Amino acid sequence: MTHQERIATLQAQGLHSILAQFCDIHGVAKGKLVPVGNLGEWVEQGAGFSGPSIWGTGLPRMGPRSEYYGRIQPYSLRALPYMPGVAHAVCDGFAGGQPLDTCSRQVLKAAVARLDARGWKLWVGIEPEFFLLKTAATADTQWQRADAHDALDKPSYDIRAILRNQDFLEAMRSTLVALGFDLQQIDHEDACGQYEINYRFDHALAAADRFMLFKQAAHAVATQHGAVFSCMPKPFAHAPGSGLHFHLSITDADGHSVFSQADGLLGLSALGQQFAAGLLHHADALSALCAPTANSYKRLAASSSVSGTTWSPVWKAWGDNNRTCLVRTVAGRMEWRLPDPSCNIYAALAATLCAGLDGMDQRLSPPAPCDDDLYQRHASGAPMPARLPRDLAAALDALQDNAALRGLVGDAFCQLFLEVKRAEWDAYSQQVSAWELQRYAGFF
């Protein structure tokens, strides 16, 4: 379609504006409303934003590269059910007329292009877990579950909670369907106030775009229902946290699986095993991009849970349908269990793909598969596989020290990411928590 044909089609649908959306280095959606009638400008030149006003662009305050241009991808245009008259569009970041190497979507596009050169396509199924919260009118503005009655010791699959929150869940269902999501299931997760909504897998870039749209829809619907959609990995100390598991598979030019082999180790081909080995080999550095907040490492801890269950992947291991491992193999594909929903989805997927491909290129071999419940092994005092970094600082150090992975992902992006996240860690380290006051104020 020409620009004018697209404009006419959009206007015939009653759409007058486009929400031109990109994301900052944190993975938070940003954008502005622009008129439908100027679509050609937004596609060819881009909607303009002040570069230094956006987290992690690295752009200067003045000069030809001070402006961030978000170029609309016209195939992504779709009407927003919760914003009448407005279409949503995904943008790529440009500066000075060139693709911006600190734009995380450009980072993922570059990684996917390297896969395209092999004639391969990465398919990703993303499993968003999230909490439905509200603020309490207390002196310290504590966060609480939006549903005060959601308080079972073992709340997984709680139908009564689904019934109490059916207005929100039905609004989510209808909104996502209107946005083109192929929904698969909605369930109450392992923590009180926690839900998971699954939808069909897609190729890597589309899957990342779809997750960004999922988050925007969830924020809008939760707000309409007096709640807060939260991607915080671990809002409650004694409950399981939220993951964002990636189900990964690669197909060749003929549509055949690159990973799957019925008689291979754990059902994987040699290339699939090498991909898994790459993930485990680079896992420490990947933690910085897949679990990018100080709070992420409260989830990635060998902690107990009031529900009696936690699936947090603490140790660098892989196993057949083993949810206590970092890499779980199932049905000729692999589930990468490290990411949480606070990640920048483009950067996390790009880094995951780069690490796996490096495992293939280096012909790395994974360790022996794990057929133990690693939490039970840990409790018994038996020897354990190496564990992931214990905090964000250690993960950032691992990324800094892994020049190979940084080079594959994009060193310009990674260095800015490290700068932003080290400042975040420093700010966190200077806070005095309620736990510290309770523990130390009158102790010594």
Image (cartoon, rainbow, N blue to C red):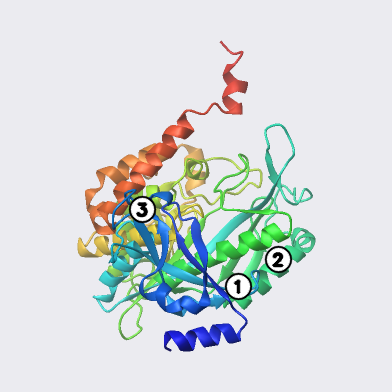
Between circles 3 and 2, the one closer to the viewer is: 3
| Residue type, label 2 | Leu
Q: Residues within 10 Å of mark 2 (few under 14, many from 20)?
A: many
Residue 51 coordinates in the image, percent (x, y): 38, 54
- Outermost residue toward the top? 444
Residue 358 coordinates in the image, percent (x, y): 25, 61
Residue 263 coordinates in the image, percent (x, y): 35, 74
Residue 57's disc number: 3
| Residue type, label 3 | Thr
Q: Nearer the viewer, residue 311 or 19?
A: 19
Q: CA distance from mark 1 to mark 2?
A: 18 Å
- From the viewer's perspective, is 78 left or right of 399? right
Q: In this orientation, does residue 379 appear?
A: yes
Q: Quadrant of the N terminus?
A: bottom left
| Residue at 46% from the left image edge and 33% from the top image edge | 427
- Outermost residue toward the left? 362
| Residue type, label 1 | Leu
Tags 3 and 2 touching, CB below 8 Å: no
- From the viewer's perspective, is 84 left or right of 49? right
Q: Which residue is mark 1?
A: 80
Q: Which residue is mark 2?
A: 169
Above or below, comparing residue 141 to residue 7 in the picture: above
Q: Secondary structure at mark 2?
A: helix
Displayed quadrant of residue 353 = bottom left
Tags 3 and 1 touching, CB below 8 Å: no
